[in-house]
Image (cartoon, helix red, strand yellow):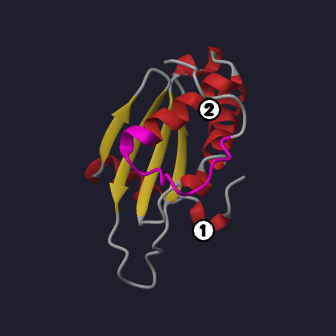
Amino acid sequence: MLPRPLRLRARKDFQAVYREGRSLVNRDVVLYLRKRNGDDASNPSHPRIGFVVSKKVGKAVIRNRLRRRLREAVRLQVKRLKQEPYDLVFVARSSLLKRAWPDVLTAVSAVLQQAGILDEAGGENSSSGGEGAGG
């Protein structure tokens, strides 16, 4: 589970990310990314992260499983994220269901790298063998 300050929960926040942000896509995950103004006290200067799995993917059990896997893969990368005011929404595609755990980690890491929000000095603890796995 992500720490509470890092969670994106409100519908209006998700809508703002979809409306004002940009999207990055790979075969298993879509990342919507929006830079926030981190000026005032009510607007934290760290990233907030939300997760979405469409009803098209399957029933609740399947969607929840996908959401848990995606959340854990992102949680393992949180220390490597730049501490800037971003809102991130990860949307799981149905193909993620068929992927092994190392492939899920690789997909999340790849889309974060594509977004350019991984802090290279942030730490090297990307648990599990994601190196060398192609996509």
User: Which residue is located at x 58 percent, y 59 percent?
Assistant: 7
Q: Is residue 81 above or below residue 45?
A: above
Residue receiving disc 2? 105
Q: Position of residue 5 (x, y in %)?
A: 60, 68
Q: Secondary structure at mark 1?
A: helix
| Residue range highlighted in magenta | 113-126
Check residue 34 in the rendering and tell me which mark sits there, or answer none.
none
- Residue 123 sits in quarter: bottom right
Residue lying farthest to the bottom in this orientation: 41
Give, as a three-letter code, the residue at label 1.
Pro
Q: Which is more foreground, mark 1 or mark 2? A: 2
105 relative position to 118: left or right: right
Please report whichever mark, 1 or 2, sits nearer to the chain's N-terminal start. Answer: 1
Q: Nearer the viewer, residue 28 or 13?
A: 28
User: Which residue is located at x 63 percent, y 17 percent?
Assistant: 99
**108 drawn magenta:** no
Check residue 5 in the rendering and tell me which mark sits there, or answer none.
1
Q: Position of residue 56 (x, y in %)?
A: 51, 22
